[in-house]
Amino acid sequence: MPALVGGGLKVRPGEVSLAHLGVLFLDELPEFQRGVLDSLRQPLETGQVSVARANSHVTFPANVQLIAAMNPCRCGHLGDPALACSRAPRCAADYQAKISGPLLDRIDLHVEVQAVSAADLVLPPAAEGSAEVAARVKAARDRQSIRLQGMAARTNAELDGDALADHAAPDEAGRILLAQAAEAMRLSARGYTRILRVARTIADLAQNETVGRIHIAEALSYRRQAPRN
């Protein structure tokens, strides 16, 4: 799967470097075959992809940033009664159920974006532009680099085990909220861990050294699951 190694680059073992790693963008996610999507589960978990053939078994680095986009249903008009098809809302459940729960569990942020109308195009630009956002992200990454200096992990996304407990453990109020949400949302161990990583990053963006209840709450708000039949 060359796209996992570097956006379509064809490489041989031993030729892959960090320069080949990048973003894997999947548009209209439910339109991909179920087997293809589920084949991403292990690379997303381990950062590696293995290719097995009769005479060899080769492992490539595949530590990609996965970004996926999809409509709420096949026609894309679920939220508009005037345009939605006659099968709504069942059509949305059927469409979104094409994505397996285990794959969704490996995606940290589930964000619903409203459609852009023609009237939106004449609104003034946002108060915070791309340059300002990039500066905030860089500052957060710098905080991570300082905190994780000398460790195998380079970013919050790589924290695990004791390192995660040491650097991303929430305060008491955050711990109580996370425990309640874990039971109510039936979070898997993987989902629980990913919420801690996201909350740690949210705290870094807010320039807070401690992960608090507000950071846990925001991380939980991104943990939405697709409707099931």
Image (tube, grey):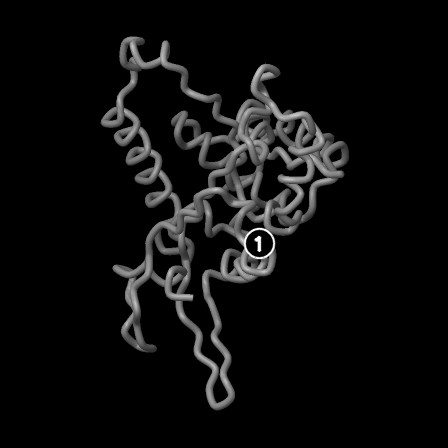
Q: Which residue is mark 1?
A: 161
What amino acid is found at the position of numbered circle 1 in the picture?
A: Gly
Element type where label 1 sits in the image:
helix
Image coordinates of residue 211 in percent, x first then y, are 52, 31
Furthest residue toward left = 131
Which residue sits at x=40%, y=47%?
A: 25
Marks counted in the figure total 1
Q: Nearer the viewer, residue 111 or 158?
A: 111
Q: Position of residue 91 (x, y in %)?
A: 67, 33
| Residue 154 vertical placement versus 18 (above, below) | above
Q: With 122 as the anchor, is 224 left or right in this view?
A: right
Residue 58: image x %, image y %? 44, 79
- Residue 182: % across, % down: 71, 36
Farthest residue toward the front? 86
Residue visible at 50% across and 79% down in the picture: 52
The residue that appears at 29% across and 61% down in the rendered structure is: 20
Q: Is residue 136 above or below residue 79?
A: below
Is 52 left, or right, of 118 in this rendering?
right
Name the quarter where the N terminus is drawn.
bottom left
